[in-house]
Structure formats: C-alpha cells, structure tokens
Image (cartoon, rainbow, N blue to C red):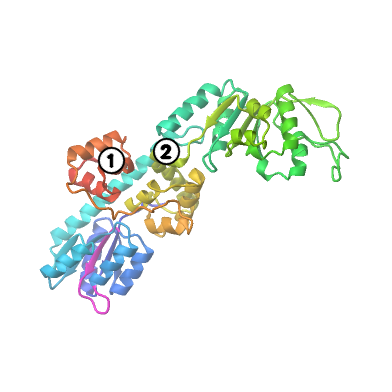
C-alpha cells in the first residue's frame, strides 16, 4: 500500500483557478480533488476526509458560506481557505465565524497559497509521525497479547510475571470484554506448562444437561446418544492448562464434582466407576461477583475458595484511558491491513471521541468499533463521522466528545504545554485534558510552539 497523502479539495466555478490550485497542490504532495460548484463540494465533504479546502465565496446556487456551514456539520478538522474576488470586512468576519482559517483575495497571492499548503502538509506529516509512533509503541508495549502502559496494567503484568511460575489455581475477575482470556493465556505462557495444551471452556455456552459429560467425559452407553467413549475437557488439558471462562455459570450439580477433581486430581467419566488421574492447572474467569453468589447460595463457598487461591482483577477500559491510543493503533494496523486500506491514524476529533467514551463493552467493544470504522472509512484517516457510524445507536459514551468546548480564557504558554506533554508521557489526550483544551487545539499549540520537533 502506498503511503497516504494529505487531501486538497478545490471548490471554484472558475476553471483557471481550479487548474492552478490543483497543479500547485500536486507539486506540494497533495492528492487533489476539484469541484466546480458548492453542491458538489458539500457532497465531497460528506464522502471524504479533506485536509485543506480552497473555497470560492461567490458561486451560483450554493455559495462559499453555505459550503462553510456544511463543513462544520460534515467535516472533521478540515482547514478552509476562502477565496474571493470581492473581499469585504463583513464577509471575512462571517467566514471566520463559520470556521474559515484563511481569507484570500483574488488575484491569488501564490507564495501565500504555497505557504498555506506547506503548513497543512507539515501538520499532516506531524500527525502521521505521531500515529506511526503510537503503532510502534503499541508493539513494544505488548505483553503476551495484552497492550497497556497505564499504571494499573503495569501492576497487572508484574503480578502475572510473579505468580505464573507457581500458582496452580487462579481466579480472574473483570467486566465483559476486558481481556480475561488474554490474561489467562499470559499465565499459561509464563508458567512451567507453556509447551502443553491450553484448553478453553466457555461455561456459558454449554447446555446444562451436558456439563458433566463435557468436563469429565463419558463412556459408551452412558446416556442416549453416547455411542463412543469420549474424554472431557479435563483429560484433554491434562499436563497443561484448563481455562474455565464464565465459571459463575456452572450449575450447582457440577460444582461439587469440579471441586473433587480440583482437590484430588481424579475424575470419573459419566457412566464409569473407574477413576482417572489428571494433572491440570485451572484458570477460571468470571464477570460476576462470586462472593455475592456465595452469600446468595448460587455458588459453593468451598469451590470459590478453592478456585480463589490467587485472584487477579482485570481493570475496565475506563480505568486505563491512557492505553486507548495504543490499543487503537494496534487495531487500526490490524484492520487497515486486513481491508487493504492505508489508514495510519485518526483525526483529532475522532481521537477525542475514543478518549472520552464510557466503553461498557471494554477492549472488545473498542476493537469492534475500529473494525467497523475501517470498513466505513473512505479517506486516509478515521474521522469522527466514521466512528459515530461504527458506534451505532448504542454508542460508547454518555456524552460524545467534540472539539466545541470553550477554550480557556488565556491560551496555555509554551512552558505549560511542554510540561503537560511531559507529565502525560507524550499522551495527547491526557495532555489536552490537563490543559483544559481540545485535542485539536493542543495540536495547534504544538505546531505554534514547534514542540514536536
């Protein structure tokens, strides 16, 4: 895949202006799109992410100010340069209020036009460098399939390293989608049984009447349909690790038999009187509060304490927002390659949406959202619009973030911006929160003070 380029859109009914700006844009390294009327320009903004738009003010039917209004609704972080042959203070003020960042009279000042293009290309290259840095760091931060650099995840990784070589029974607690199975696999890979089998059992997916047979196996004729002897999951995992996912779903009739196997290392297949020895390391996981289940009689206390020799709590995504950029970079790399799309990163508004989401489905939900957004994306960056479409009606946040928050009365100084970036470890989301500015405003401050260099 070719490296993406910044996208320039020229909207002007004058063919000479379109040709001139298109030629300059290509020379400056842009992918160039042109439209000869405002309606077509609005449609292009709805379909593509545009980095820089040169927009004619006076066009028939739909003029430049109408396109500017549409840009606020449909486009994410597009730099707009309004061009006109009839400049006036009133239209300039109105244009600025509607989001125009440059106001260029005709005939065009070509050095100034070139300077604008170079500034936007520099911003694009800066963002691309940041995205590549996040993706590279995500690879470095990966811990046996788990990505994180937040304090809670660093503590989790350290705990796994210390316990994995010794613990034979582990209980992993965490919300749905938080990565409990990845933690279980990390325990297996770092333990003495890493070269043996890792067998997963989803307790919530087994029909209640078949639990005993699935876990412990059965002999021929034990029940209707048992035409052959069949080993269960415990025998399949003997010598290795058995992962009991959603162990809180185990029916009461099976809990006692599971406890016996854990304590004696011996099981009986359904329909057999002979015991069989198994040597299994059991890692169990649940999203339930098993202590409350024990108090309510839904889970055996002796089984709970037998499983809970070592307890690991996997934090929800909302408690590790520092990890969202790196998780996003890893998922983006995976799905942009899978869909053969050159999508190195997200726009600032899109990053804010992710950072401020509530994420009830945790990392699994974030992965699914990035996958759907990559499918929807028609440009070179994931936009807020792509994410809103991927999130659907359920959403991920109680209040979806935008960059419309009021800026601080006094803009942060270079020293304040630098200190915030340093204190956040380079994380733009956290730095913008500390400064009380939007992510987009932070990028402008970084560019203004040349802090990225």
Percent x, y of residue 439: 29, 48
Q: Residue at x 23, y 49 (%)?
A: 444
> From where the camera sits, is residue 106 visible?
no
Percent x, y of residue 366: 47, 47
Left or right, 68 with respect to 374, comes to left
The front one of 244 and 378 is: 244
Q: Residue at x 23, y 67 (%)?
A: 55
Q: Which mark is residue 188?
A: none
The part of the image, by quadrant, that contains residue 232 is top right
How packed mark 1 is, by other alpha carbons closer than 10 Å (few <14, some 14-19, many 20 or more), is: some
- What residue is shown with label 2? 320
Q: Residue furthest bottom?
A: 61
Q: Residue furthest right?
A: 221
Percent x, y of residue 420: 26, 37
Q: Which mark is residue 434?
A: 1
| Rendered-image quadrant of the C terminus | top left
Along the polypeptide, which appears first: circle 1 or circle 2?
Answer: 2
Report the magenta residues as a range: 51-63
Given contact means CB atoms under 8 Å apart, are the residues at marks 1 and 2 in contact?
no
> SS class of the residue under badge 1?
helix
The front one of 362 and 330 is: 362
């Amino acid at each position: 895949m070719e490296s993406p380029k910044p996208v320039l859109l020229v909207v002007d009914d004058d063919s000479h202006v379109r040709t001139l700006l298109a030629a300059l844009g290509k020379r400056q390294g842009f992918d160039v799109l042109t439209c000869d009327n405002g309606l077509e320009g609005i449609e292009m903004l709805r379909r593509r992410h545009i980095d820089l738009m040169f927009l004619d003010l006076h066009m028939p039917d739909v003029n430049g100010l109408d396109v500017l209004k549409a840009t606020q609704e449909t486009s994410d972080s597009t730099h707009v340069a309004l061009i006109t042959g009839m400049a006036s203070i009133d239209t300039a003020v109105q244009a600025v209020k509607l989001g125009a960042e440059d106001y260029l009279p005709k005939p065009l000042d070509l050095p100034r036009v070139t300077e604008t293009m170079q500034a936007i290309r520099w911003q694009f290259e800066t963002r691309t460098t940041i995205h590549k840095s996040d993706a590279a760091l995500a690879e470095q931060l990966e811990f046996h399939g788990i990505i994180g650099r937040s304090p809670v995840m660093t503590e989790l990784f350290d705990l796994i390293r210390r316990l994995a070589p010794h613990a034979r029974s582990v209980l992993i607690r965490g919300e749905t989608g938080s990565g409990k199975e990845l933690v279980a696999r990390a325990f297996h890979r770092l333990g003495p049984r890493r070269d043996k089998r890792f067998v997963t059992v989803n307790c919530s997916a087994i029909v209640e009447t078949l639990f005993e047979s699935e876990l412990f196996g059965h002999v021929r004729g034990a029940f209707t349909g048992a035409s052959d002897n069949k080993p269960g999951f415990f025998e399949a995992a003997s010598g290795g690790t058995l992962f009991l996912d959603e162990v809180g779903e185990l029916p009461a009739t099976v809990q006692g038999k599971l406890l016996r196997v854990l304590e004696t290392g011996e099981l009986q297949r359904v329909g057999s009187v002979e015991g069989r020895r198994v040597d299994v390391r059991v890692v169990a996981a649940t999203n339930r509060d098993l202590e409350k289940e024990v108090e309510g009689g839904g889970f055996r206390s002796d089984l709970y304490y037998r499983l809970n020799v070592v307890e690991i709590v996997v934090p929800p995504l909302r408690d590790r927002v520092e990890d969202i950029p790196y998780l996003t970079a890893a998922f983006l790399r995976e799905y942009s390659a899978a869909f053969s799309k050159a999508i190195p990163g997200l726009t600032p508004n899109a990053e804010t949406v992710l950072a401020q989401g509530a994420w009830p489905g945790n990392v699994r939900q974030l992965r699914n959202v990035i996958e759907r957004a990559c499918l929807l994306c028609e440009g070179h960056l994931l936009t807020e619009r792509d994410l809103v479409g991927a999130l659907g009606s359920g959403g991920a946040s109680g209040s979806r973030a935008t960059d419309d928050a009021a800026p601080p009365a006094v803009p942060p100084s270079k020293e304040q911006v630098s200190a915030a970036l340093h204190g956040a470890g380079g994380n733009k989301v956290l730095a913008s929160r500390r400064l009380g500015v939007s992510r987009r405003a932070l990028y402008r401050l970084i560019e203004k003070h040349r802090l990225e260099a």
